[in-house]
Structure formats: structure tokens, C-alpha cells
């Protein structure tokens, strides 16, 4: 059985990716940090479909917890797909951002991603596929999320550098950059704010987690075997870099 790891796989985009890759035939090891219940619900749903799955509590900013993740029997046996999806986003005006807030965001979004990769890289198969969930804000910036934007920019440039370093290896790594997606990040929007977002998108709708999951499924499949180091913007035309 092929194994896929999805960090932050118990909620939102991560949960959709976990379900989609399970439907593609991967057993799913998903991680969570703050709440076990949503993660266990995703695991139960996947198991009900006939595919094995497990949820692992892992704070990606803690090297000791990530090291424990690497000792899981599924990881030791070999990992075909790694999806780096975890993240934090606290809206803070760029002019009010302080160093401590920046440090926390970078520690989770960028350093945590690197730590997961660095810890389990020796368990990745020769033809492993890695997908990093970035953001449109990692290219365009945000007046209310300079720290988040910086962390996603760092992720994308790191991933593209890694893609180049793979050279003739069959390993591949790509970045998916979502736009507006119907997750907890938008949950606090007023009806007026949501309507304004919809009008801003050329396709006139907010994206769904399944929109992102479908793109990840493509990027880890044989259909994309000549694609690596690419940033794919999945945003309904909201931002065209």
C-alpha cells in the first residue's frame, strides 16, 4: 500500500487532500496539532471507504515531535507522497507586526515545513512527490498578513530550490497557491465581505477545499511527471502573476 503524509490533514484544505488521496489509493497519515476530533473524523471517514488511515498529533515546530513522526512504521516502510499543508495565519497590520509575531509564523509555516522534510527525507521513495501548499499572498503580499505572506514566499522559493537540487532524481516537488478558499480563514467574513470577495473573483465564486485537493492529486500523479518546481495558482482568476 502506498503511503501519503498530509500535515495539517484534519481540517479544511488538508482534510480535503487527505480524502482525495485516499480515493486515489493511498493510505493516509495525517497530522494535527490543536484538536484531535476533526482529524479523527477524517480518519474514520477514510477507513469507512476501505482505505487505512491514522492521525498523529505533531507540533511541527518541535523537533522532538517531528522525530517521533519519523518513527511511525508507515514512514519507516517508505513514503511516496508528502503534502506540506499545515500553517497559521493571524491577521496583523504590516505596520504593527512585531518580531515575536513574525517569529511564530515563520517557525510554523516555513521552519516547520523544512523540519518535516529534513526529518523524513530518508524515508521518501526514489520517485516521491512533494506538494507544498503556498498562497497567492506569497507572491502579491498582504497589508494584513505580511508575516504570512513572507512565510509562504519562503516556502515557494525553498521548494523551487529543492526541485532544482533533485537534478536527475525522480523526486518532484511543486507548490499550489490558493486564492480565496472556503475554510476557517474566511469564516469570520460578514455577508457583505463575502459578497465583495466573490465579485473580485472572475469565476464569481469562492474556491472549495476540493478545488485545491484536485490540483494536489494531479501534481502527485503520473499525469504530471514532467512538472517540478512549479507554482500553480488555483484562484479562479483572482490573481494572475
Image: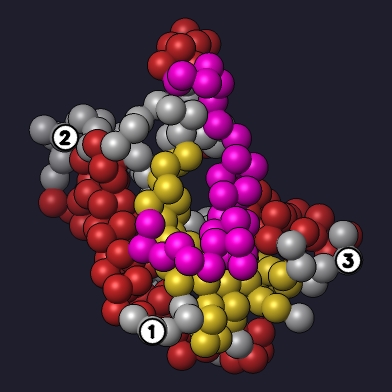
Q: CA distance from mark 2 to mark 1?
A: 41 Å
Task: Describe the element under mark 2 as helix, strand or loop.
Answer: loop
Q: What segment is highlighted magenta in the picture?
A: 201-230
Figure colour scheme: secondary structure
Callout 1–callout 3 Cβ contact below 8 Å: no
Viewer-nearest residue: 142 or 201: 201
Image point 53% across, 68% down: which residue?
225
Instruction: Relative to 1, say whether 113 is above or below.
Output: above
Q: Which mark is residue 94?
A: 2
Residue 78, percent across and down?
A: 60, 87
Instruction: Relative to 151, say whether 136 is above or below.
Output: above
Q: Is disc 2 surrounded by few (<14), some (14 to 19) or many (20+) residues within 10 Å?
A: some
Residue 111, percent across and down?
A: 30, 67
Q: Which of pointers 3 and 2 indicates the residue nearer the eye? A: 3
Image point 31% across, 51% down: which residue?
152
Residue 41 part of the magenta-drawn span: no
Q: Which residue is mark 1?
A: 168
Q: CA distance from mark 3 to mark 2?
A: 47 Å
User: Which comes sooner in the sequence, label 3 or label 2?
Assistant: 3
User: Which comes sooner in the sequence, label 1 or label 3?
Assistant: 3
Q: Which of pointers 2 and 1 indicates the residue nearer the eye? A: 1
Residue 208 part of the magenta-drawn span: yes
Amino acid at each position: 500500500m502506498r503511503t501519503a503524509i498530509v500535515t495539517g490533514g484534519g481540517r479544511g484544505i488538508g482534510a480535503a487532500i487527505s480524502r482525495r488521496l485516499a480515493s486515489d489509493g493511498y493510505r493516509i497519515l495525517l497530522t494535527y496539532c490543536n484538536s484531535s476530533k476533526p482529524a479523527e473524523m477524517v480518519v474514520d471517514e477514510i477507513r469507512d471507504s476501505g482505505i487505512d488511515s491514522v492521525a498523529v498529533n505533531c507540533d511541527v515546530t518541535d523537533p522532538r515531535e517531528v522525530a517521533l513522526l519519523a518513527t511511525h512504521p508507515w514512514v519507516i516502510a517508505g513514503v511516496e507522497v508528502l503534502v506540506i499543508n499545515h500553517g497559521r495565519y493571524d491577521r496583523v497590520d504590516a505596520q504593527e507586526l512585531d518580531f515575536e509575531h513574525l517569529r511564530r509564523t515563520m517557525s510554523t509555516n516555513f521552519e516547520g515545513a523544512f523540519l518535516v522534510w529534513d526529518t523524513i527525507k530518508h524515508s521518501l521513495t526514489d520517485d516521491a512527490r512533494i506538494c507544498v501548499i503556498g498562497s497567492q499572498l506569497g507572491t502579491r503580499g498582504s497589508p494584513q498578513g505580511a508575516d504570512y505572506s513572507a512565510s509562504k514566499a519562503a516556502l515557494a522559493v525553498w521548494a523551487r530550490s529543492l526541485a532544482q537540487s533533485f537534478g536527475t532524481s525522480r523526486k518532484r516537488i511543486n507548490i499550489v497557491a490558493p486564492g480565496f478558499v472556503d475554510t476557517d480563514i474566511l469564516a469570520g467574513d460578514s455577508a457583505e465581505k463575502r459578497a465583495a470577495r466573490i465579485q473580485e473573483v472572475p469565476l464569481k465564486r469562492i474556491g472549495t477545499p476540493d478545488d485545491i485537493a484536485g490540483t494536489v492529486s494531479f501534481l502527485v500523479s503520473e499525469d504530471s511527471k514532467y512538472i517540478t518546481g512549479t507554482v500553480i495558482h488555483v484562484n479562479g482568476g483572482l490573481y494572475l502573476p
